[in-house]
Image (tube, rainbow, N blue to C red):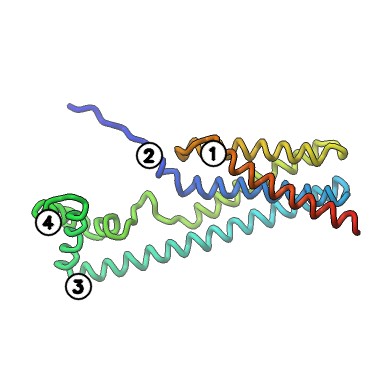
Amino acid sequence: MRPRHAETHRTAHINWLRAAVLGANDGIVSTASLVLGVAAAHAGTSSVLVAGTAGLVAGAMSMAAGEYVSVSSQADTERADLRREEQELASEPDAEHAELAAIYVGRGLEPELANQVATQLMAHDALASHARDELGITELLRARPLQAALASAASFALGAAAPLVTVALSPTLTLLPVVAGSSLLLLAILGWLAAQVGGARPWTGAARVVLWGALAMAVTSVVGAIFGTTA
């Protein structure tokens, strides 16, 4: 008996990973930028914390709503395609069989074998066969709106909490550099881990996240300093 060959593919993580990385990254960048901008305007620590907390709550809700609406649209499209495919299978089974066989021929099978494969797969589960091979819809990669929304909201809140904790623990005089430095470090770690899980180059993932995070914080701090000076 041949031993089973267990394989682990990273595509299994792609739905929740995308939402979680986007949420955590946005939470750190937006909240750190917000508190740095408010702090640069010479606001007190309590005002910075209030602004940051409001940003956390608003951002988490916005991320959840945005992900839910976006992924729901994808799910609606998938359901509509599946309904149409189901109707075509019922009304034109021969044409659908030929279509599936042509797909397999295009992938390298001989026409006779392609017809046999199409026949057997359609006898087993015609809709699933066409969903997978014609539409590219699989159970593993199906759109899951609620899962994406919850992952985005939770990861945003977790990411946003880090700058707020740093603000609460940092002396007022060193608040700006400490928040900026710790946030950039967290972004680098996040980018590294996301790249590792996704199979990309860790240094590349860390560098691009840090670059855009630093840019956002710098611009917001400058804006806060200008308005703080002119107020």
72 relative to 190, above or below: below
Q: CA distance from mark 2 to mark 3?
A: 37 Å
Task: Look at discs 1 and 2 and give the one toward the viewer.
Answer: 1
Tell me if label 4 and label 2 are in contact, CB under 8 Å: no
Q: Is residue 151 left or right of residue 176?
A: left
Q: Which residue was labeled with disc 2?
A: 9
Residue at horizontal 45%, vertical 37%? 199
Between discs 4 and 2, the one toward the N terminus: 2
The mark found on residue 175 in the picture is none
Q: CA distance from mark 1 to mark 2?
A: 21 Å
Q: Which residue was labeled with disc 3?
A: 91
Between discs 3 and 1, the one toward the N terminus: 3
The percent coordinates of residue 89 (x first, y second) are 21, 67
Residue at horizontal 79%, vertical 51%? 222
SS at circle 4:
helix
Q: Which residue was labeled with disc 4?
A: 115
| Residue count near mark 4 (Cα–Cα under 10 Å), binned few <14, some 14–19, many ≥20 | many
Q: Is residue 24 left or right of residue 202?
A: right
